[in-house]
Image (tube, grey):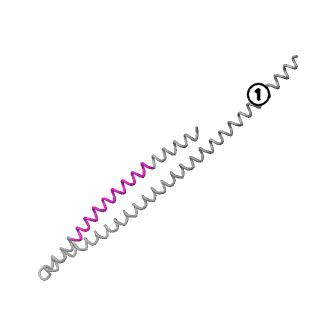
Amino acid sequence: VALLLVTVSLHTSANRWRELQLQLEDREDAHHAELATMQLKFKTKCGGVDKAMAALEKERDLGRVKLREKTQELTAKKQEVAQLQRAAKEAASRRAGVEQELTDAQETNREKEAAVASAGDELEEMKQTSFDALRSCRERTGVLKRGLQGSSAVMAE
């Protein structure tokens, strides 16, 4: 009888062991499927973040190029103004015979200074726009990083 009880107990334990193994395998399969789904979602989100980062970097680079161009234009305008101012001083020293030329040079000088002032205003606007875009890019980068970290935290769970 004791041998029979031991045999029945071993048989019951073996059946229970097989059931637990099957349950474990089912859970493992479910976890693998869930992990694959989470990895796919993560890759999708990472791809979106990468695209957004690339777009922001491209926007930043474009802003930098425009800023450089405007700075070069402003420098050229300043050089032109400096040359015109020197010409105006020379014309003033030769005033006796060159009154008409002096008047023309001063009028041209005023036009160039107005153009420089206008370009300076545009440059300041471009600088502010660039700074705002950079700040916005940094904020968006922070949001995207936090989103990515949140996704990583979800993946870790």
Q: Is residue 147 above or below residue 11?
A: below
Quadrant in which the C terminus appears: top right
Q: Residue at image x 55%, y 40%? A: 154
Q: Is residue 116 left or right of residue 30?
A: left
Q: Residue at image x 27%, y 72%? A: 80
Amino acid at pointer 1 = Arg
Q: Is residue 94 above or below residue 34?
A: below
Farthest bottom residue in view? 97
Closest to the observer, 30 or 140: 30
Quadrant assignment, res 131: bottom left
Quadrant assignment, res 122: bottom left
Q: Position of residue 40 (x, y in %)?
A: 59, 48
Q: Is residue 52 left or right of residue 32?
A: left
In magenta stretch: residue 145: no
The region drawn magenta spans 111-140
Which residue position is annotated with label 1?
16
Q: Residue at image x 76%, y 27%? A: 16
- Give the dominant element type of the magenta stretch: helix, strand or loop: helix
Q: Residue at image x 55%, y 50%? A: 44
